[in-house]
Amino acid sequence: MKTLIRRIIRRITRRFTQLPTVVLFGLLTLPGALVAQEIATEALTTVTEGLTQGMTLILNLVSAAVFVIIAWAIITKFNDARRGRSDWGEVVVPFIAGAVVLAFVGWLNTNGQTAIEAIGAAG
């Protein structure tokens, strides 16, 4: 019975003497884990910045396309009125509608830029 108790005590003491080594080894590997996490965070930030730049480019291209379409419609109506194919009153309608649409697209563009910047800042 005494030998059994001695064996148990030896096993327990061996385990506890190895414990500081395990804890110390775990603490020494902690900076390596933090560096790996920092690299992953930097990669995520880089990806987020790229996506926000892409979204900004798409938003600006859509705004430019809307401007070109409205300008083309107004110029077409103006040429028709100048040649006598339509009344001058018909030139005013696309002009006013185009101004309203451009103001709305400008407002959407501004709010979209703010939202995209917020996404980039959060990432």
Image (cartoon, rainbow, N blue to C red):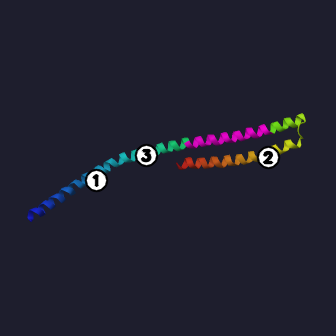
The residue sitting at 89% across, 41% down in the picture is 88
Element on which disc 1 rests: helix
CB under 8 Å between callouts 3 and 2?
A: no
Looking at the image, tell me whether mark 3 or mark 2 is earlier in sequence order: 3
Element on which disc 2 rests: helix
Residue 16: x and y in percent read: 21, 57
Tell whether 74 sits left or right of 25. Answer: right
Cα gap from disc 3 to disc 1, whole angstroms: 23 Å
- Determine which residue is flagged by label 3: 38
Looking at the image, tell me whether mark 1 or mark 2 is earlier in sequence order: 1
Is residue 79 found inside the magenta-colored segment of the image?
no
Element on which disc 3 rests: helix
- Determine which residue is flagged by label 2: 97
| Residue type indicated by callout 2 | Ala
| Residue type indicated by callout 1 | Val
| Residue type indicated by callout 3 | Glu
> In this orientation, which residue lies closer to the viewer: 28 or 87?
87
Residue 24: x and y in percent read: 28, 51
Residue 40: x and y in percent read: 44, 45
Main SS of the magenta part reads helix
Q: Residue furthest top?
A: 83
Tell whether 76 sits left or right of 116. Answer: right
Residue 8: x and y in percent read: 15, 61
> In this orientation, which residue lies closer to the viewer: 21 or 66?
66
- Determine which residue is flagged by label 1: 23
**Which mark is in front, 1 or 2?**
2
- The residues colored magenta run 51-73
